[in-house]
Image: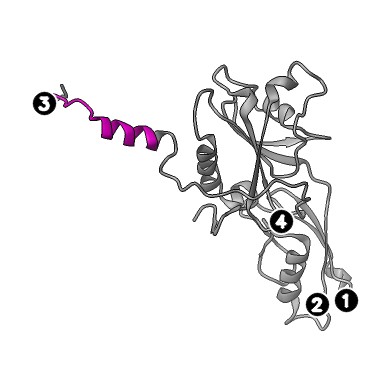
């Protein structure tokens, strides 16, 4: 009975099935992932990165800049330029174009300074979020840095996601529970902007939950966007 004295009707089998499908991520299209490979993604800039910008024809304009929270960098004589989610060649092209009306030879050299390995850890961990990792990082270290596994975590079904060569997300699973017992187990070495997702134990279709993470992460929030199938995450 509700607050107005109306008697609640029993939930039908069909309604319950639809509700459970929505709760389990069934509302998202089952977008295919690219085949996993050891592809090394190009360096992409992220807010907080330091960049050395040099103009050989106008060295007085050389400057070291920091990518701001909105993803842009500020340089002399030109409006702020978007740097987040850009590769080195892409940013050099944008800056050369910005300086083309001011300089006879607007070539620009862009050099990223050393930056920490940023990874996103989500799901059944104590403190999900984006983490800076020093040195050689792996998925087990990332989970521990994110507050360790919750008791509800499926430790042997951890999902690793990485941006593939065409921008599509690559996915693999790893048994991190073995890594707690066996030092020779595969701990899944990570690369910049990898996503580590720990599903809840006993939940089917964990990959559908991961797609929600893709859609919720904006390029500025996490430095890039994935393309899932024919669509880009966030569309």
Label pair 2/1, CB-CB below 8 angstroms: yes
Give me the residue at 60% from left, 52% from top.
226
SS at circle 4: loop
Which disc, if any, is residue 165? 4
Give the Cα distance between marks 3 and 4: 57 Å
User: If you read the primary sequence from the N terminus, does the residue marked by circle 3 or circle 4 appear first?
Assistant: 3
Q: Nearer the viewer, residue 119 or 51?
A: 119
- The range drawn in magenta is 7-22
List the residue tagged with mark 3: 6
Q: For marks 1 and 4, give the one nearer the viewer.
A: 4
Is residue 17 in the magenta section? Answer: yes
Frontmost residue, 148 versus 55: 148
Q: Nearer the viewer, mark 4 or mark 2?
A: 4
Question: Which one is earlier in the sequence, the residue at label 4 or at label 2?
Answer: 2
Is label 2 in a helix, a strand or a loop?
Answer: loop
> Mark 3 or mark 1, which has the lower sequence index?
3
At x 32% / y 37%, what residue is drawn?
Answer: 18
Q: Is residue 204 above or below residue 60?
A: above
Left or right: where 232 falls relative to 132: left
Please report whichever mark, 1 or 4, sits nearer to the chain's N-terminal start. 1
The spot of residue 196 in percent (x, y) is 65, 35
The residue to which callout 2 is attached is 106
Disc 1 packing (10 Å; few <14; some 14–19; many ≥20): few
Quadrant position of the N terminus in the picture: top left
Q: Which residue is mark 1?
A: 57
């Amino acid at each position: 009975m509700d607050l107005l004295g109306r008697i609640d009707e029993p939930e039908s089998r069909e309604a319950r099935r639809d509700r459970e499908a929505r709760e389990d991520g069934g509302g998202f299209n089952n977008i295919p992932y690219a085949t996993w490979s050891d592809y090394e993604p190009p360096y992409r800039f992220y807010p907080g990165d330091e960049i050395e910008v040099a103009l050989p024809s106008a060295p007085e304009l050389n400057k070291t800049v920091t990518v701001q929270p909105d993803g842009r960098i500020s340089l002399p004589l030109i409006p702020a330029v978007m740097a987040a989610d850009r590769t080195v060649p892409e940013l050099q092209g944008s800056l050369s174009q910005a300086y083309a009306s001011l300089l006879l030879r607007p070539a620009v050299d862009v050099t990223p300074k050393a930056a920490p390995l940023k990874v996103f850890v989500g799901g059944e961990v104590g403190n999900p979020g984006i983490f800076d990792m020093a040195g050689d990082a792996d998925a087990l270290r990332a989970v521990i840095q994110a507050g360790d596994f919750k008791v509800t975590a499926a430790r042997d079904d951890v999902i690793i996601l990485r941006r593939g060569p065409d921008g599509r997300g690559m996915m693999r699973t790893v048994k991190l529970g073995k890594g707690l017992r066996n030092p020779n187990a595969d701990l899944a070495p990570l690369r910049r902007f990898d996503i580590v997702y720990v599903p809840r134990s006993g939940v089917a279709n964990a990959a559908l939950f991961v797609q929600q993470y893709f859609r919720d992460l904006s390029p500025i929030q996490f430095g890039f966007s994935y393309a899932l199938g024919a669509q880009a995450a966030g569309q």
